[in-house]
Amino acid sequence: MNRGAWPLLIGLLLGVVAGLTYAWAIDPVEFVGSSPASLHSEAQADYLTLIASAYAATGDLPRARTRLALFPGPNAAEMLGALAQARLASGRPPSEAQALALLAGDLGVRPSPPPGLTPRVATGVPAAPPTITRTPSPRPSPTVTLTPGAPFQVDRRELECDATLRVPRIRLLVLDAAGQGVPRIEVVVLWDTGQDHFYTGLKPELGNGYGDFTMTEGVTYTVRLAESGALVTGVETEPCVDESGGVYPGSWWLVFVQPPPP
Amino acid sequence: MLHLLRTFRFWIGLILGLAAALLYGWVLQPVRVADTSLVSLRQDYRTDYVLMVAEAYDGEGELSLAVQRLAALGPETPAQYVDEAVAYASDQAFAVDDLERLTRLARDLQSAPPSPAASSP
């Protein structure tokens, strides 16, 4: 090597060392002024839960939406629903899951009625002509329209032979007297050797009042709404046959409805 | 003359090295702000966090839960974070309801008896 190049190389090396030492040791980057989106996953979960808790207290949906917009993601309602399940599974207070479910439900789009269920809406109203531009209706209030004290009744109990549901489930829908899905209803599932519970509204994409539970073949379950006591007994998997003659376990579709006030 | 040339080359190398290091650190491999904690939240976000704690406290009425949530913001006392939030919210002309919520939380924190952990030496 040309001896004249040595000073250049030594200077270069010292420059790199000095630059990195300054950048990494003497004056390292301090993480201040970060946004909620840059939080680590656990802190994000806490932040999202706090958004839901604040919403549960204030009912201010636009503000909750603004706060959720800080977190990138295609579907905030699904994200909150999944978080509610995760928090519930990890033994966090049920109030957290309820707040998350409430916000997820209020953010979610009201789904079409489940198969076989007649929607309880006024009939005979002519459909609006397609040329009319509709003013967007206001967002639903987070207040649950329940008739206080009125119990729920079992409205429907059907075996579902749906080949796409390869895992048998108890699928459940809770509706108020107006036919609206009711989130945050605790559902207790009991069987011979144990019990579990879940809440409606944790999967808002399937309805505010929707919840499900994975069944084990050969086990008989009793399903009860915790507060009202409405009960379905003897729920167990039943064999279904698909188009190719294969047998698979069917799921159960249960609908609980609050009767209209007298 | 030769010594002068060597010195010149050394300084050229040093400047090039510094420039290369900064180019690497700031352009090619810039720092990605990720996996941060609540401690590093920007002031406006931190104020909104405290406001959410105050809103939730309004609904839940559990001061211990509010303290627990505020403690996640860092090593200062919960009351300090609320005081900072009140000051920021006043400067930024937050809504009266929000200021009242923050003030109420600050007042309840000050009037609450100190926790055993806080009073121990």
Image (tube, coloured by chain):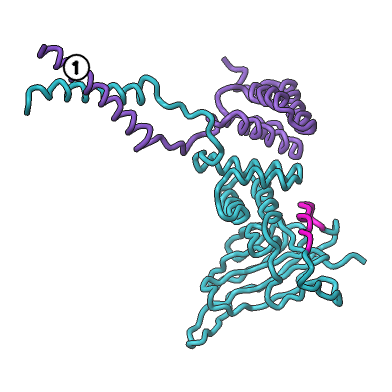
Color used for chain B?
purple
At x 93%, y 66%, the residue is A262
Q: Quadrant of residue A23?
A: top left
The question of residue B6 being in magenta is answered with no
Callout 1: chain: B
**Which residue is the extreme one toward the right?**
A262
Residue furthest out toward the front: B1
User: Where residue A73 sits in the image (x, y, percent)?
Assistant: 55, 51
Q: Quadrant of the N terminus of chain A?
A: top left
Please give left or right for residue B4 compared with residue B107 in the image.
left
Q: Can residue A7 be seen from the camera position used here?
A: yes
> What range is drawn magenta here?
A134-145
Relative image position of residue B98 (x, y in whole percent): 75, 32
Residue linked to disc 1: B8
| Chain in cyan colour | A
Question: In this image, A3 relative to B46: left or right?
Answer: left
Q: Is residue A211 above or below residue B62?
A: below
- Work out whether A191 lies above or below A116: above
Q: Residue at x 39, y 21 (%)?
A: A27
**Which of the two residues, A108 or A150, is positioned nearer the viewer here?**
A108
The question of residue A136 being in magenta is answered with yes
